[in-house]
Amino acid sequence: MVRYAVAFALPDLAHDAPPALVADVMLHLCADEDDDVASLATFAVGLQLEIDGDRVRDVLRQNMNHPSAEVRLDAARGLACRRDLEGILALRESILTRTPDLLTLDAAARSRSALLADALASACEHAEANGIMFAYRCCEEGPLKNADTASVALSAVQAMVRHDPSVTDAAIFCPLYDVGLAIRISRTGVGEEISLFNALDALPTIN
């Protein structure tokens, strides 16, 4: 089936094709009459493509009411990754009523929502131990509740501001689609975002 092949292959070609075109095609396929195509497209939009906006969330919300349970779960995962409350609540219900798979645990970890912590704790006996404990820590601790992580992140920001005269501002944040922290750096007329790990790698050279 051509539409299935497109939904399967296009996300992997996203770096070589115009992003707007990829997003438009995949969002269109989310409403495909074939459940397998709709599920694959919803999964790609939700978990593979780093796109966001009203249209993206509207499509995912529409598929939260899809006849297929798998499409509904794909949509909930995608919304949860974007830290959307409706998606987080739907993901919580899924975790409480069925053993969460690795994709669900990945979405939960990316959401970093404390609303999922108790559901993940209750599922610990049934799911993959490593995945669920990681997701639980992400949701229970949050990106900055861990004192060591917060201290290291703050040190990285302070070092950048102190040693690079072109930096006018720096802030720690938790980016969408990711479970880690990043640092947003502002220079005169320029903005930059780097992962915390990359920032830490640079610290010995600027201290």
Image (tube, rainbow, N blue to C red):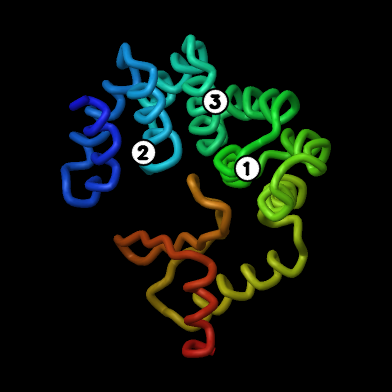
Labelled pair 1, 3 in contact (Cβ < 8 Å): no
Q: Which mark is residue 51?
A: 2
Of the residues under marks 1 and 2, which one precedes in the sequence? 2
Q: Label 1, on which residue?
A: 105
* Label 1, label 2: how far apart the Cα atoms are: 20 Å
Q: Is residue 194 left or right of residue 95?
A: left
Image quadrant where residue 172 sits: bottom right
Dot 1: within a 10 Å radius of its alpha carbon, few (fewer than 14), some, or many (20 or more) residues? many
Question: Image point 49% across, 33% down: which residue?
Answer: 78
Name the kind of residue labelled 1 in the image. Leu
Q: Position of residue 112 (x, y in %)?
A: 65, 44
Q: Position of residue 197 (x, y in %)?
A: 53, 71
Q: Is residue 166 left or right of residue 196?
A: left
Question: Image point 57% across, 53% down: which residue?
Answer: 179
* Label 3, label 2: how far apart the Cα atoms are: 18 Å
Q: Secondary structure at mark 3?
A: helix
> Farthest residue toward the front?
1
* Label 1, label 3: how far apart the Cα atoms are: 12 Å
Dot 2: within a 10 Å radius of its alpha carbon, few (fewer than 14), some, or many (20 or more) residues? some
Q: Does residue 202 sit above or below 4 in this rendering?
A: below
Name the kind of residue labelled 3 in the image. Leu
How many labels were placed on the picture?
3
Q: Position of residue 83 (x, y in %)?
A: 56, 35
The mark closer to the camera, 1 or 2, is 1
Question: Image point 36% across, 22% down: which residue?
Answer: 38
